[in-house]
Image (spheres, helix red, strand yellow):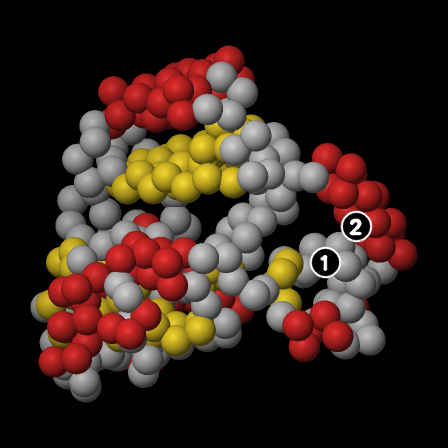
Amino acid sequence: MTWTVAALYKFSKIKDREAFQAELKSRCNDNGVYGSLLVAHEGINGTICAPTREAMDKVTDYIISEIGDEKLSLKYSTAELRPFRRMKVRLKNEIVTLRKDHVDPTKDVGIYLNPQEWNELLKNNPDMPVLDTRNDYEVEIGTFKNAVDPKTKVFTEFPDFVEKTLNPEKNKKVAMFCTGGIRCEKASSYMLAEGYDEVYHLDGGILKYLEEVPKEESLWEGECYVFDHRVSVGHGLKEGTYDYCFGCGFPVNATDKAHDSFEEGICCARCVGDLTAAKRKSLTERHTHFKSTQVGVA
């Protein structure tokens, strides 16, 4: 079976989150849809998979009927194995956690750039800060040439990085990017609220860029971490060379897997020192279940 996968998000005011959550759960369950969706007052975010496109449409059509399709980021792909084990629809305070009450991406965000416009901006503004708004382990396996790595463990550390590193009086023009567009869209709203004049972000994120820009024209270096069983992708969204460590959630390459500390489904050199007997038992049981069901890691 080939599964239809949809990654989606939209910043949009949702008044009755509980009713929206309940209906989403019902429609997903009725149509055999798996994955994870986050619902907050500021919008919806998540990735889901369905056994057929018709089943997927019954869920996405409902979402569109409630919040509209304008500026809805909805990207489809396929998977041979079911990428998710269960369906979760969770209520959250934010669909991307920043914890800055003065930031409202439903009202004010930066300037969207398509991949071709992004290339032109970077080529014509070599001194402009280009911020990678992802976390450190994602940046580690690939990023844009000369991009700034904030070295954040979580997104809530991004404002501290901006405050310590940049200045709206000096850095009049700033660009930013992330995996699928949602994190840098919220980051752009934060930057505008902090007084930065020209804020640009890559529409559709790295994934759209890798899908549309030929390798010979690309400014991307390395691979892009993705939050499903593929682990990483390259140009043309071809599956990359990284695997996944169940112990810590970090991507691992061939060198990591050759290390004496690496155990498939259990741990790698990064996390073996934190592995307790109880955690090893839990990971072993999870890996055994994963192998028996042939379901992805998400």
Picture residue at 62% right of the left edge, 43% below the top:
296
Is residue 64 something that shows in the picture? yes
Is residue 42 something that shows in the picture? no
Residue corresponding to mark 2: 283
Residue 270 image position (x, y, % from top left): 70, 72
Q: Amino acid at mark 1?
A: Gly
**Quarter in which the N terminus is drawn:** top right
Where is residue 64, by image quadrant?
top left
Where is residue 14, by image quadrant?
top left
Question: Residue farthest to the bottom?
Answer: 127
Picture residue at 32% right of the left edge, 83% below the top:
146
Number of numbered discs present? Answer: 2
Under tag 2, what secondary structure?
helix
Residue 259 image position (x, y, % from top left): 76, 76
Q: Is 151 displayed left or right of 125 in the figure?
A: right
Residue density around tag 1, few if under 14, some if 14–19, many if 20 or more, within 10 Å: many
Residue 202 image position (x, y, % from top left): 24, 60
Q: Is residue 239 above or below residue 63?
A: below
Alpha carbon separation for disc pair 2 and 1: 7 Å
Under tag 1, what secondary structure?
loop
Residue corresponding to mark 1: 247
Picture residue at 46% right of the left edge, 68% below the top:
223
Q: Earlier in the sequence, mark 2 or mark 1?
A: 1
CB within 8 Å, label 2 to label 1: yes
Q: Is 238 displayed left or right of 204 in the figure?
A: right
